[in-house]
Every structure is written in structure tokens, then in C-alpha cells.
Amino acid sequence: MAYTDPFLARGISISPADQEILNRWHDTTPPPEGCAVPKLMTFEEAMDYDGFLDDCFRGFPGGESVFFWDTDDISAVVGYYYTGPLKGTVYMLHGPTDISPEFFSLARFRDYYCRVLRDFTDRGDPNFEDKFWHNIDFNDNQPMTPEETAHFHQAAQELVRLWKAEDLREDWYENMGFCVCAVLPDCFAGELIPFLHPKEDEYVLEVLCHKLVRAKCVEALPAMEELAKAEARGLRIGGWSDSRTARWALGELRRLREYET
């Protein structure tokens, strides 16, 4: 029996390409050392998380997910979306609840995983385990392919529709915003400008500011100027009582505009 067979029998949809990755991982990859390194679970171990998924994530508009990896001694798991707009993407959950994708495909996560174990352990870095949960190289530092750009632009538009059309509980609302920022290709970042206003969720605003700077979206300057004014008057972006997120983003976008001219 292949590793993925019981998951498929349970109704968890996994693409043929991802089945091959998981089956090969199970058959050929020895269990890694380190209490914080993600370890591929058995089907039975993965199903032990069903109750947690039911309580926290079942019905999430971005898609249903399953945990394939967990760790020995820290509360950290790796999730795989198998339905919805985020299908096929991978998130890493540790600490604050953020289930936005860190990798656009299981193949990208596999490449990242192998690279961290190879590069960090080869040079004896004592903090290599933290590389899986802090300062993660988003999508293994790989840009979207043209096919991914088209696919995730459409996925982001569907996420926005669900995000704004449904009456979501607070944590799901925030996560939908996080997911939109994660998967929307940078070349379409201007589509996020309408959400850059003081009435938006303060945690979503923090992610939006960083996204627009990373995408070099200078057309967001007028909206960012207004948000910076609201922040100066006491708006707590990201929950920070001394937030300077919008003012930092405004300065970065101004420098980008000056560089372009």
C-alpha cells in the first residue's frame, strides 16, 4: 500500500504529482534528527489531528487542509490544502495562528526542506531547526512561474470574493486577508489598494503594508499617506501600541518612487 492510499480513501484529494512526492518521501527519506524538524507522520498520526482541524479550521473558505508533518517537542505542524482556491499549497503553523501559504506547491516545500537539512547541518549551524519556523524563505525564494502567476491571480480574486462576501469569524477573516497577500502575484499588488484604509482589520493592515512595499507598489502612495496619518493619530496597526508600520511603508514607497524617477 502506498503512503497516500489511506488519505485518498479518506477523501483527501492529492494530485498525482504530490502523491509521488509524498510516497517517495515516505519510502526513501530517513527520519531527520532534531526535535523541531518536521517529520512525516503516519496516516494514523495525521488523523489524530482531526479534532483540532474540526475545532479550528474545518470549513475555512480558503480550503480544507490536512497535516502531513509535525514535530517531536514543539507545537508545530505543516499543513497541505487539498480543496479550494489554495489547493496544493503548503503552510507552516507554529505559534500565532497564521495558515497562509508559505509555499505555492508541495514540490517547493520539498526543495526547501532538503536544502535546509543539507546546507545548515553541513556547516554545523546549531539553529538550523529554527529555519523551519522562523524567517522562512518564502516559496524557497523562487519566483512564480508564468503559469503560477495566472493561477494564483485567479485564486486571489476568488479569495477576495469569499473574504468580503462572507460574515467570517475574526480569526478566519484575518487569515483570509493573510492568504490573499501571500498568493497574489506582486505584479497585481495594486488590486490590494482598496483595502488599505483605517477601517480594515489592524493585523491585515500590517501584512498589506509589507506586501505593498515588497511588491514595490508605488501607486499605493496616496492610500498609504492617509493610513500613515491615521497611524500617527493612534491607529494600532498589527496591534502595536507604538505602531510605525504605515509610516515605515510610506517612507519605503517614497524612496522607491524617487529611485524610479
Image (tube, rainbow, N blue to C red):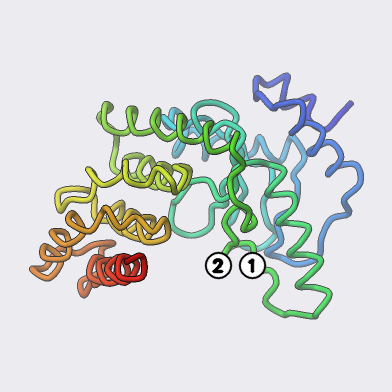
Viewer can see residue 49: no
Residue type (three-letter) at the residue carrying disc 2: Asn
Q: Position of residue 116 (x, y in %)?
A: 73, 64
Q: Residue at x 64, y 67 (%)?
A: 131
Disc 2 secondary structure class: loop
Q: Which mark is residue 73?
A: none
Residue type (three-letter) at the residue carrying disc 1: Lys
Q: Residue at x 89, y 54 (%)?
A: 30
In the image, is residue 52 above or below residue 38? above
Quadrant that contains the N terminus: top right
Do residues under tags 1 and 2 come within 8 Å of each other at their CB atoms? yes
Q: Which residue is mark 1?
A: 131
Q: Which residue is mark 2?
A: 135
The image quadrant that residue 114 belongs to is: bottom right
Q: Residue at x 60, y 29 (%)?
A: 82
Quadrant that contains the C terminus: bottom left
Q: Is residue 131 left or right of residue 93?
A: right
Q: CA distance from mark 1 to mark 2?
A: 6 Å
